């Protein structure tokens, strides 16, 4: 078809459309609509059938859970226990990570020694390798730490090793303070010291069996202290860079059997000190 004829036909069709739009009423147009739609039936029907087949394959009806309601509830409860356990483990790892951060510059002043044995008797001690002959050698009175907090002090040192008196031994009394981590105004965890008694520090005494005790506070003075609170070092006899270092965690609070008006607060290190494989001695 030439360009001239195409233009004529196109113009004629447009003219007929304009006349139909101006002359035919909406009622007549509505009557013609179903008849015009039948012209598309040979294409529309197969397309609709194919669409239904594809939809049936891709969107299957939801499967019915064969488990009973009791089984589903039991499984949900088991999942809740697992989540709680994992959350507690995550909290422990976060505390350990904070301990690594608190160690800070102290680690640069330490030397790590392997533990070669413990006291076979009732004393809370460890034997470590090392010597007094080197420039940074072992000396009596040097603090001993690990990633979880304080371990004790070097009480004997020689050319072939040294003995450490643990903080859980009754002969090594410390002064410390209570505190806990809590969320600050900026959303970050921060350590807050607790005010107990008339002084900011308390006497912490080893009682063996990997435990220490605070028994100089009245029950009223000890009211702010809760289980899982931390006890940190606040002792001028120890180096300044160890102040605030963790002694242990409060595991129990109860009236003293011999004096019910006073509290017995049991504190335990974050690990069994007599089972440590290695420790770090602050040699500088």
Image: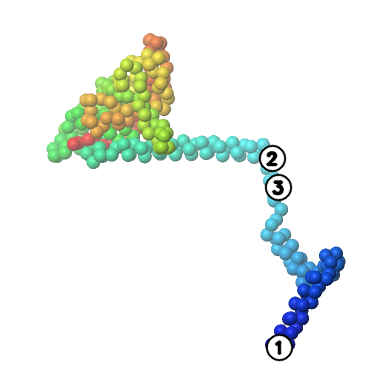
Which residue is at 77% across, 69% downward?
Answer: 44
Please tell me which residue is depicted at 28% across the width and 22% down the height of the picture.
175
Q: Is residue 4 above or below residue 99?
A: below
Q: For the residues marked 1 and 2, what is the alpha-carbon distance in whole angstroms?
A: 78 Å
How crowded pointer 2 is (Cα within 10 Å; few <14, some 14-19, many 20+) is rated as few
Which quadrant of the figure has residue 158?
top left
Q: Which residue is mark 2?
A: 68
The answer to which of 58 and 5 lies nearer the viewer is 5
Nearest the viewer among 258 and 13 is 13
Who's the residue at 28% across and 34% down the image?
A: 145
Give the residue number, with chain letter if any, for mark 1. 4
Mark 1 element type:
helix
Please name which of the two marks, 1 or 2, marks the residue nearer to the observer: 1
State left or right for residue 264 relative to residue 126: right
Compared to residue 216, the image places residue 68 above or below, namely: below
Pick the front one: 179 or 130: 179
Task: Mark 3 vs mark 2: give the one in front.
Answer: 3
Residue 195 spot, x, y in % from top left: 35, 22
Q: Earlier in the sequence, mark 1 or mark 2?
A: 1
**Residue placed most toward the observer, 17 or 22:** 22
Residue 64 - label: 3
Q: Distance from label 3 to label 2 (Cα)?
A: 11 Å
């Amino acid at each position: 078809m030439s360009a001239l004829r195409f233009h004529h036909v196109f113009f004629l069709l447009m003219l007929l459309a304009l006349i139909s739009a101006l002359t035919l009423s909406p009622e007549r147009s509505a009557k013609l609509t179903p008849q015009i739609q039948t012209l598309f039936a040979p294409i529309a029907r197969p397309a609709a059938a194919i669409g239904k087949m594809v939809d049936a394959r891709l969107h299957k009806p939801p499967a019915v859970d064969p488990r009973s309601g009791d089984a589903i509830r039991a499984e949900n409860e088991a999942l809740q226990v697992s989540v709680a356990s994992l959350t507690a483990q995550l909290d422990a790892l976060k505390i350990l990570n904070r301990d690594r951060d608190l160690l800070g510059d102290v680690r640069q002043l330490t030397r790590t020694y392997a533990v070669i044995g413990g006291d076979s008797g009732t004393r809370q001690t460890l034997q470590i390798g090392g010597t007094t002959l080197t420039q940074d050698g072992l000396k009596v009175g040097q603090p001993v730490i690990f990633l979880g907090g304080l371990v004790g002090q070097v009480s004997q040192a020689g050319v072939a090793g040294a003995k450490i008196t643990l903080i859980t031994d009754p002969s090594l009394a410390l002064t410390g303070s209570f505190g806990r981590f809590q969320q600050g105004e900026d959303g970050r965890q921060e350590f807050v010291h607790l005010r107990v008694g008339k002084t900011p520090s308390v006497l912490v005494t080893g009682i063996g069996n990997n435990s220490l005790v605070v028994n100089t506070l009245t029950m009223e003075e000890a009211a702010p202290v809760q289980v899982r609170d931390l006890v940190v070092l606040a002792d001028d006899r120890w180096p300044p860079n160890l102040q605030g270092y963790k002694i242990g965690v409060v595991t129990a609070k109860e009236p003293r059997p011999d004096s019910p008006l006073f509290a017995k607060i049991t504190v335990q290190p974050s690990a069994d000190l007599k089972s440590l494989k290695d420790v770090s001695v602050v040699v500088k």
